[in-house]
């Protein structure tokens, strides 16, 4: 009889401990700071891996079928479409911090997606006061500087977008800065160059034998490894100053053709052929040519100093060598 009583007491104690544990986990989850990620692709997933233990994370998804990897890291999916403002009503007051990774549309000179997002974040909930985010980090592009003819530039360089793709990014930056000032929200802008990783290398281009420019016609290009960009985003959340732009680039100073040659060498592929610029028409796609027609070297001093970033891959060579070990050639 005593044994039965003891066993019953133990079962109740264990059940109570499990119940308390579940309640504590739920309580701790709600005690975490809240984070909304808009634009849930590769960079967002890499960023979530760094932040999921520190934040209760929501992700905006146009397609609910793309949520599996994010769900596995505890991300709470919200269905919505930046091209459909009526679908964004759930975003109001949902998070203290917002990471805006979504690109503008593919045409026009404005970014209506950013317009709709900011409006949704600012819209008061029904019968409630508006609860705005405390911080927003926007991932822009270094293309906003335009062609700098190979000059070394920093964030004080006047913006001079060369094509409509970059014009739309400038529009988004302006919207976000004004919104931050108007609503007293800390906004930081990361100007990102070419992103590379083991899944983001120009191997097909090299295997197809597409040409690069001869050195005299070639321009400087800039890069950042996808893992380093995720780390920069996470540091911007902590240390980014309000209204401040940061060049999110590595230390490499390299022309585009030399980058293709470096990748080819590491994967034992032939170098792309080199052609003068006047032979580019018909041999290089207009979209690729728009990148090749710009040349700039970008300083990352402000990023390292203010965001306290230490790059895992300071140069493209280190990043590409690491990629070789992860790809089944």
Image: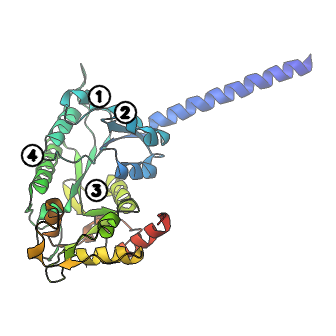
Residue indicated by mark 4: 110
* Distance of label 1 from label 2 (alpha carbons): 15 Å
* Distance of label 1 from label 4 (alpha carbons): 24 Å
Name the secondary structure under disc 1: helix
Q: Find residue 64 and name its label.
A: 2
Looking at marks 2 and 4 on the same chain, the residue that comes earlier in the sequence is marked by 2
Residue 35, image quadrant: top left
User: Up-down: is 230 above or below 90?
Assistant: below
Q: Position of residue 185 (x, y in %)?
A: 22, 44
Name the secondary structure under disc 3: loop
Circles 1 and 3: CB atoms closer than 8 Å: no
Side of 6 relative to 284 (left or right)? right
Name the secondary structure under disc 2: helix
Looking at marks 1 and 2 on the same chain, the residue that comes earlier in the sequence is marked by 2
Q: Of discs 2 and 4, which sits in the foreground?
A: 2
What residue lies at 27% left-to-right and 75% top-to-bottom? Answer: 272
Circles 1 and 2: CB atoms closer than 8 Å: no
Q: Of discs 2 and 3, which sits in the foreground?
A: 2
């Amino acid at each position: 009889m005593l044994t039965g009583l003891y066993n019953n007491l133990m079962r109740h104690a264990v059940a109570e401990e499990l119940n308390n544990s579940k309640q504590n986990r739920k309580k701790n989850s709600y005690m975490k700071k809240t984070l909304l990620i808009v634009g849930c692709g590769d960079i967002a997933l890499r960023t979530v891996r760094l932040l999921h233990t520190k934040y209760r994370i929501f992700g905006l998804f146009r397609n609910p079928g793309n949520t599996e990897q994010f769900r596995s890291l505890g991300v709470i999916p919200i269905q919505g479409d930046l091209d459909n403002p009526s679908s964004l009503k759930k975003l109001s007051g949902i998070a203290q911090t917002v990471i805006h990774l979504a690109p503008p549309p593919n045409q026009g000179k404005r970014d209506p997606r950013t317009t709709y997002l900011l409006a949704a974040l600012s819209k008061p909930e029904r019968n409630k006061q508006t609860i705005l985010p405390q911080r927003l980090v926007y991932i822009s592009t270094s293309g906003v500087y335009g062609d700098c003819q190979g000059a070394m530039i920093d964030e004080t360089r006047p913006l001079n977008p060369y094509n409509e793709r970059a014009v739309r990014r400038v529009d988004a930056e302006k919207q976000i800065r004004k919104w931050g000032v108007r609503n007293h929200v800390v906004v930081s802008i990361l100007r990102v160059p070419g992103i590379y990783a083991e899944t983001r290398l120009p191997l097909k281009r090299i295997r197809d034998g597409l040409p690069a420019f001869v050195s005299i016609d070639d321009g400087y290009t800039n890069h950042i490894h996808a893992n380093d960009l995720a780390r920069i985003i996470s540091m911007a959340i902590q240390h980014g100053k309000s209204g401040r732009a940061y060049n999110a680039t590595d230390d490499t100073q390299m022309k585009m053709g030399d980058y293709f040659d470096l990748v080819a060498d590491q994967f034992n592929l032939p170098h792309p052929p080199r052609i003068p610029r006047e032979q580019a028409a018909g041999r290089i796609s207009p979209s690729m040519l728009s990148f090749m027609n710009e040349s700039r070297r970008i300083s990352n001093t402000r990023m390292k100093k203010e965001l306290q970033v230490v790059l895992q891959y300071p140069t493209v060579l280190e990043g590409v060598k690491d990629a070789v070990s992860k790809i089944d050639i």
